Amino acid sequence: MRKLSLSDDVLLQVDKAARYIGGEVNSVMKNPNDVAIRFAMTFPDVYEIGMSNLGMMILYNMFNEREDVWCERVFSPWMDLDKIMREKDIPLFALESQDAITNFDFLGITLGYEMCYTNVLQILDLGKIPMYSKDRTDDYPIVIGGGACAYNPEPLAPFFDLFYIGEGETVYDALFDAYKKNKTRNGSREDFLFMASQIPGIYVPSFYDVEYKEDGTIKSFTPNRIGVPAVVQKQIITNMEEGYRAIKAPVVPFIKATQDRVTLEIQRGCIRGCRFCQAGMIYRPTRERNIETLKASAREMLKATGHEEISLSSLSSSDYSELKEIVTFLIDEFKEQAVNISLPSLRIDAFALDVMSKVQDVKKSSLTFAPEAGSQRLRDVINKGLTEEVILRGSRDAFRGGWNRVKLYFMLGLPTETEDDMKGIAHLAQKIAEEYYEIPKEERNGKVQITVSTSFFVPKPFTPFQWAPMFTEEEFIEKAKIVKAEIRDQVNQRSIRYNWHEPDVTVLEGFLARGDRRAADVIMRAYEKGAIYDAWSESFSYQTWLDSFAETGVDISFYTTRKRSTDEILPWDFIDAGITKNFLIREWENAQKESVTPNCKMKCSGCGAKRYGGGVCYESQN
């Protein structure tokens, strides 16, 4: 019988005890004495969120394919268990073995979004691992970070031994081999960190020094020892057949995960080039997976899990060249099992509507558009590549096909935004409602319901908008009020519901997204003052963060509302993300000229990703 780190008494006190017991279908068990490396794969959020993370599960599968590695899973304890673990001095443990994470060689932390940063400190704290890397001896795990937020690792740099920049399939084997080699030599932690720094894509923060100018901007960012590269280069797989490590048997949670389904990744990257989108930039070039491989993976994963839904994962599913074939296959192949097909990230056109009518219950579904901006002028600024005509035509076709609910997603606070752009959000919603009411009454499916949601714009590293200023919390609220008032003035305002994201969370996200090493002091102070689960509205306290800024003397406006010069050294400039700074500057200038850049399949924009020698750069361009 498996041992558990938590007693029955503790498990009966916490919500969803199944988060902490492990033993799920397809979880991997090994004998710790039979492996050379133990890796604790960590997601700094609650179990249900972490178990929905595709990247984490790909690495879990890939690491466990090695006989000399045992990869286990670790998640942030929810607040009820967090309290008990501190009171009873219970160390944080991994799910599979239930062993304390101090017993592991590596603690790998997925950094998917900025608002999880205090949970990173929770993991280290509950795990009894010194939170600052400089305080760790050879007895502690190597703490390594990866994921989208690792493209600006500086706010968390003092807490990590390593960061990995790129896709995990490429470098981890070399990292593990270096670790074993160092072990056989009886090398120190420092010896291994230097060996790791020689592996492409690996960044060791302690091997770099930062100097600042009097105005607070960065004066220099340089290696502090010989042999450490000045630039860390993103690593990706270029051949999706040879390099991709498909999941064969995904772990099936005992409780419902946020994404409770099989996830089939159909491609990586995006051809669109939206100027606000970090993922669309850092995951270039677009690389498609082979259709026959996808079919085999779908069969294998559904059989291994018993899931009744499969989701096609991509930043822009409509751009996958074999989308029609894979969807038709899934409909025909799994008709008898009543497997539902989820199609996120679709551009609404005739094909998409035809597909959705086959795979969804029309009465339960809603149509989703993400125009992002209320006017065509601003959509051109952000290079959205979506016209009002396309939106209205898609809505019209959908309404005639039986849909009567539409969700619209926008951003407020985009560069060059005017009041007319904000009001345009309400006007577009009104025009969509008008499309519905042009249908004869007897042919309508009840009343139309249009939900307008606005988030507030956050400039992200490695986007053309990385130099843009943000707005203050008060300014964001005023923008939302303008949209709300304009919606109320529309003829069909009763058919339009409006909601918006919290501006205080957005401002903090902006600080963390573009912060430098000085941000670490604020994160630590906020954690010490009780900040945890900042991505959750029920636990987020903006006042705690404001107090932390005041106590550390860090000015949040320096990182948020200040416009940056393209000559300024940015905290992440030492990373080569595959796209050139000249390209980003050119796109920043094109945005201000309201000039549209064609997508990658239409014309190469010279972003720099062609150097990788694969993907759309070579399929479309020679």
Image (cartoon, rainbow, N blue to C red):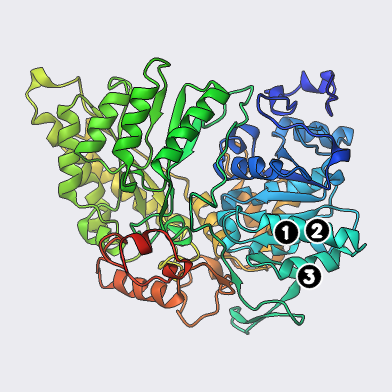
Q: CA distance from mark 2 to mark 1?
A: 6 Å
Of 525 and 474, the residue lying toward us: 525
Residue at 85%, 46% (x, y): give it: 102
Residue holding disc 2: 179
Q: Residues within 10 Å of mark 1 (few under 14, many from 20)?
A: some
Label 1 element class? helix
Instruction: State the image coordinates of residue 45 (x, y, percent, origin top left).
Output: 64, 40
Q: CA distance from mark 3 to mark 1?
A: 11 Å
Instruction: State the image coordinates of residue 253 (x, y, percent, origin top left).
Output: 62, 26
Q: Residues within 10 Å of mark 3 (few under 14, many from 20)?
A: some
CB within 8 Å, label 2 to label 3: no
The label number, if any, that marks residue 175 in the structure image = 1
Instruction: State the image coordinates of residue 487 (x, y, percent, origin top left).
Output: 24, 41
Q: Is residue 230 above or below residue 349?
A: below
Report the side of 6 relative to 365 (left or right): right
CB within 8 Å, label 2 to label 1: yes
Q: CA distance from mark 2 to mark 3?
A: 11 Å
Which quadrant holds the N terminus? top right
Say which quarter of the image contains residue 323: top left
Single out the mark in the foreground, 3 or 1: 1
- The single residue placed furthest to the right in the displayed view is 186
Residue holding disc 3: 194
Amino acid type of the residue that numbered disc 2 sits on in the rendered structure: Tyr
Say which quarter of the image contains residue 375: bottom left
Say which quarter of the image contains residue 174: bottom right
Of 149 and 195, the residue lying toward us: 195
Label 2 element class? helix
In primary-sequence order, the first of circles 2 and 3 is 2
Is residue 156 visible to us here?
no
The label number, if any, that marks residue 287 in the structure image = none
Of 266 and 529, the residue lying toward us: 266
